[in-house]
Image (spheres, coloured by chain):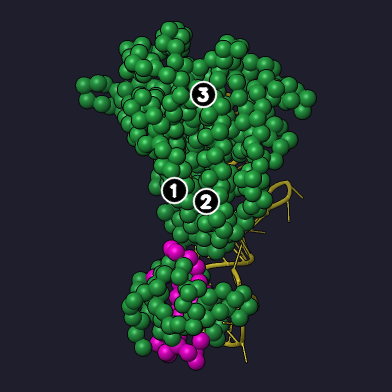
Chain colours: A green, B yellow
Amino acid sequence: MPVSAPFTEVRHLQSHLGQQVSLRGWVRNARTSKTRFIELRDGSGFVQCVVGAAEADPESYETAGKLTQESAIALTGMVQQHPKTGEPEILVKALQLLAPSVDFPITPKDHGIEFLMDNRTLWLRSKRQWAIIRVRHTIVKAIRDFFDEDGFTLLDAPILTPSSCEGTSSLFETDYFHEGMAFLSQSGQLYQEPGVPAFGKVYCFGPTFRAEKSKTRRHLTEFWMVEPEMAFAGLEDVLQLGERMVKFILQRVLEGRQEELKILERDTAPLEIALKETFGRMSYTESVEKLKTLGSDINWGEDFGNDDETILMNATDRPLWVHRFPKSFKAFYMAYDPAQPDLALGADLLAPEGYGEVIGGGERSSDIEYLLAQIEHHGLNRADYEWYLDVRRYGGVQHAGFGMGLERAVAWICKLPHVRETIPYPRMMGTLRP
RNA sequence: UCCGGUGUAGCUCAGUUGGUUAGAGCGCUUGACUGUUAAUCAGGAUGUCGUAGGUUCGAGUCCUACCACCGGAGCCA
């Protein structure tokens, strides 16, 4: 009996119980005894296929006994319930080898991270990576849906830029014809602000690049960032928008990716808390006081160290907004607090469970004189920013926005030890291939 | 960039005080096995001990330099 079309996707098997179907995919694992068991994956899901001598034709039974990991196969059989787990499984009648796979490097046993990273393209086939990338997909979709439904217009920011948005030490450079050098964008934010008077509410969502020589569990040189910007808005609006967005994302993931979270052995209780409870809020000044009582040696005016974030977040079970930092260590375009001019009207959202900063944002200065002074103070070239200053010259109004690092959000929601698993092809200081 | 660690079979690792022919598990392979699920059981094949020098009668083991990777710090999303 030949295997024949039409083919069914594994994700639809539940609705085919008791029927005959054909599947095609790859052998995740094959266990041979008198009865042969094939764990099949087709990208949409996983299913165990049972090949018994009584039900399968002799040729198929023979083939099933010799399958190697990651061979591509097609098969036809009856969808039944697994006698122990109750999940759908296939009682195979016919099976054929589509393409063999010899000595697949990633075996079911443990591997080191270097080996897995070198074999990233093959690693993507593993169950855990499958789950992570699907959660990432859901988060990306949730972000786009959230802003679309909220009336934001997509305003794509350029990746090749003539100058830096923030610091200059961490830019990737490339030749750009008569212009000399171009730089890979570190942030789309400055290009979002001109979109404010044009569209009211805008966002961009794409890759950004930082040539930082950081080797930590939360840094990539190429990462994705979503950056909304809105008119007639201040710091409070940023806090509310960010919190609504994060909750929207959490809800989508908890609704639609339970199977993946289970594969990742993710305890969803902390995510449920973040979804239901109001996020914490603390001013920078308050947080420094609290850190001192918790044993940190931080002083007012210093930025948080990694330990400080950890200390602060160990004391809470939900995301925390820290707002009104000293403006001295924030970007030049941040608005200052009229009530206390040495503070910036900015805020960072710290994720619980040790994941640290996932959002940074705030109100942008509308004061052109102040910005000119800041540009000079930061040693930036004013001519590069004339178009940016035009946002203030022609109907400049209060506006605010934030940036969220996608990979950090994925790492938190999946509770991964390192952001390198949150993106299909991670780019880090020492990793450019594959 | 700084500090710490690791590098031995395709993979994950063990290797005593420097000592003769370098080991295990997985994977692969041959066979066995009444539903297995990191299946199990029995047999088999598999090594430039990161690279280059040095010490020594003798180096996987000690020393020096370099390389790669891992972890942390700083910086950041």
Label 1 sits on residue: A141
Alpha-carbon span between mark 3 and mark 1: 26 Å
- Magenta stretch contains residue A64: yes
Alpha-carbon span between mark 2 and mark 1: 9 Å
Please state the chain letter of the residue tagged with numbered disc 3 in the rendered image: A
Front disc: 3 or 2: 3
Percent of width and height locating residue A356: 61, 35
Q: Which amino acid is tagged 1?
A: Lys
Marks 3, 1 in one chain: yes
Q: Which amino acid is tagged 2?
A: Arg
The magenta region covers A43-72
Q: Decide: marks 2, 1 in contact (CB < 8 A)?
A: yes
Earlier-in-chain disc, 3 versus 2: 3
**Image quarter hosting the N terminus of chain A:** bottom left
Residue B70 falls in image quadrant: top right
Percent of width and height locating residue A234: 51, 24
Marks 3, 2 in one chain: yes
Residue A293 falls in image quadrant: top right
Q: Which mark is residue A252?
A: 2
Percent of width and height locating residue A177: 22, 25
Label 3 sits on residue: A234
Give SS at disc 3. loop
Residue sitting at x 41%, y 84%: A94
Mark 1 packing: few (<14 Cα in 10 Å), some, or many (20+)? few
Please state the chain letter of the residue tagged with numbered disc 2 in the rendered image: A
